Image (tube, grey):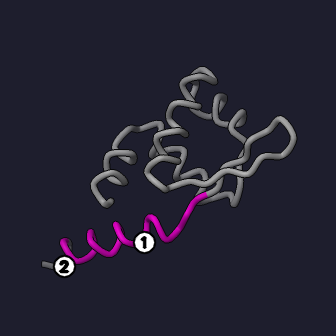
Amino acid sequence: MEIEILRALAHPVRFGIVRKLAEQAEICACDFTDDFGVSQPTVSAHLKVLREAGIVTTRRDGNTICYSLVPRALAGVAGTLAELAGS
């Protein structure tokens, strides 16, 4: 699972999405297009990768889909990286 998470985070837009979600508890998908200068379909594709890796979760509010981080998904990778950095 750690490899899938690292792969998902390896793209600059996806890493940026995760950074923004770390700053805000929940963000609607449409708000990412302006932040990264990419189209809505591109943002949706990146969010799908993050969702499939278990990094983000969704909540539907009418026609809007809001995203938030799954902190425990990142905690395992953070622990492994910390171990590697300490060796």
Graded by Cα atoms within 10 Å as few (under 14), some (14 to 19) or many (20 or more), the crowding at tag 1 reads few
> Is residue 23 found inside the magenta-colored segment of the image?
no
Q: Which mark is residue 59?
A: none
> Is residue 75 found inside the magenta-colored segment of the image?
yes
Q: Residue 83 at what x, y percent from top left?
A: 22, 77
Q: Amino acid at mark 1?
A: Ala
Segment tinted magenta in the rendering: 69-84
Quarter of the image with the N terminus in it: bottom left
Note whether 21 is above or below 85 in the view shown. above
Q: Residue 68 at what x, y percent from top left?
A: 64, 56
The residue depicted at 68 percent of the width and 38 percent of the height is 29
Extreme residue toward the right, this view: 62
The residue depicted at 50 percent of the width and 35 percent of the height is 46
The residue depicted at 73 percent of the width and 51 percent of the height is 59
In the image, is 31 to the left or to the right of 1? Answer: right
| Distance from the alpha carbon under mark 1 to that under mark 2 | 16 Å
The residue depicted at 47 percent of the width and 36 percent of the height is 13
The secondary element bearing badge 1 is classed as: helix
Q: Residue 41 at what x, y percent from top left?
A: 59, 22
- The residue at which mark 2 appears reads as 86
Q: Which mark is residue 75?
A: 1
Note whether 36 is above or below 57 in the view shown. above
Q: How many marks do you count on the picture?
A: 2
Q: Out of 83 and 67, give the one closest to the viewer.
A: 67
